[in-house]
Image: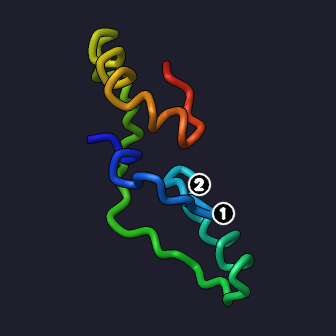
Amino acid sequence: KPLSWFMGDHKFNYIIKFENLVSDFEEVCRLLKLDIIPLKQLNKSAYNHKYKNYLTKSHIEKINEKHKQDFISFGYKMD
């Protein structure tokens, strides 16, 4: 199920996105007036995988259709 389904009608002040993990985490710490601690990066892959290299156009269309509300809710482009 799309993530937005699990969220229901709950409203959130801030959502941390994985691709901005460090900066988003630091911003939440600032908002909550907490000390900023460095996040450790463990088990980093040596590969830079791009999902478009593994998915067909049909796969991407199905993902966009199933997760449309997530793309809208979290501000992602459907491409």
**Front position in the image: 48 or 27:** 27
Local crowd at mark 2 within 10 Å, few (<14), some, or many (≥20)? few
- Helix, strand or loop at label 2? It is helix
Q: Label 2: which residue?
A: 20
- Circle number at residue 11: none
Residue at the front extreme?
9
Element marked by disc 1: helix
Task: Give how far across and how far down residue 57 sits, in percent.
Answer: 34, 10
Q: Are marks 1 and 2 in contact (CB under 8 Å)?
A: yes
The residue lying at 29 percent from left, 18 percent from top is 62
Is the residue 30 above or below the residue 63 in the image? below
Residue at (65% x, 72% y) in the render: 28
Question: Residue 67's spot in the image, x, y percent?
Answer: 37, 31
Quadrant of residue 20 within the rendered picture: bottom right
Quadrant for residue 64, please give it. top left
Residue type at numbered disc 1: Ser
User: Residue at horizontal 59%, vertical 37%?
Assistant: 75
Q: Is residue 2 left or right of residue 70?
A: left
The residue carrying mark 1 is: 23
Quarter of the image that includes the N terminus: top left
Q: Quadrant of residue 63?
A: top left
Mark 1: give few (<14), some (14-19) or many (20+) Cα within 10 Å: few
Side of 22 relative to 49 (left or right): right
